[in-house]
Amino acid sequence: MPHANSIQPKPADLIEQVVSQIISLPQVLELVGDPRVKRALLLIHTEPQRDWRYQNFADRSHRSVDRFSRVFMGCVGIGLPCYLRKMRVLLALPLIDARELTLQEIALQVGFSNEVTMRRAFKEELGICPSKYHHDMTEIVASNGNCL
């Protein structure tokens, strides 16, 4: 139960925090020095729904899995599984906003194995589940006269 004096963040504040963390792929690629990691990132962003693993990129770059994972983490700052989770959550946001697909369809489209996995990732990354995000966005849109 939240403390009586604690202030719950507003949905708009949460969304603003998430958006401020989004960096475009060209910006990311500029920051990455290793060409093999750049190629890996391009592939990941081209096909986010694929089941990417270190082995995929280690084989392509003629490095061991251990070596590629260390280089990836050194260049990107986080490991491949964490990068994929964050990226997929961010890719899901506009699809949830569009309200045209079910959460299961969105999960598969952005690369999660199922809706449950996407729900867990949302909770880890944003502190809320996708349906709460959708509900809060609906309230924000309604209160702003459909203008964000």
Image: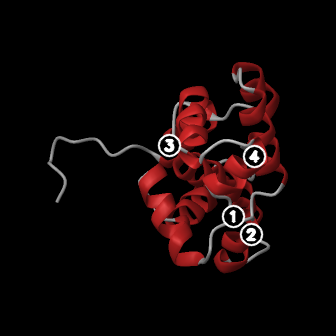
Which mark, by number, is residue 147? 4
Task: Return the residue nearer the eye: 102 or 52.
Answer: 52
Residue 115 image-quadrant placement: bottom right
Question: In this view of the protein, which residue sits in the foreground, 121 or 78?
Answer: 78
Where disc 3 sits, the SS reads helix
Q: Are marks 2 and 3 in contact (CB under 8 Å)?
A: no
**Residue 99 — which label?**
2
Which quadrant of the view contains residue 107?
Answer: bottom right
Residue picked out by circle 3: 14
In space, the residues marked 2 and 3 are separated at their CA atoms by 19 Å
User: Disc 4 vs disc 3: which is toward the camera?
Assistant: 3
Amino acid type, mark 2 = Arg
If you read the primary sequence from the N terminus, does the residue marked by circle 2 or circle 4 appear first? Answer: 2
Q: Which residue is mark 1?
A: 96
| Pointers 2 and 1 in contact (C-beta within 8 Å) | yes
Q: Which circle, 1 or 4, is nearer the viewer?
A: 1
- Residue 104 picture location, percent across and down: 66, 79
Figure coloring: secondary structure
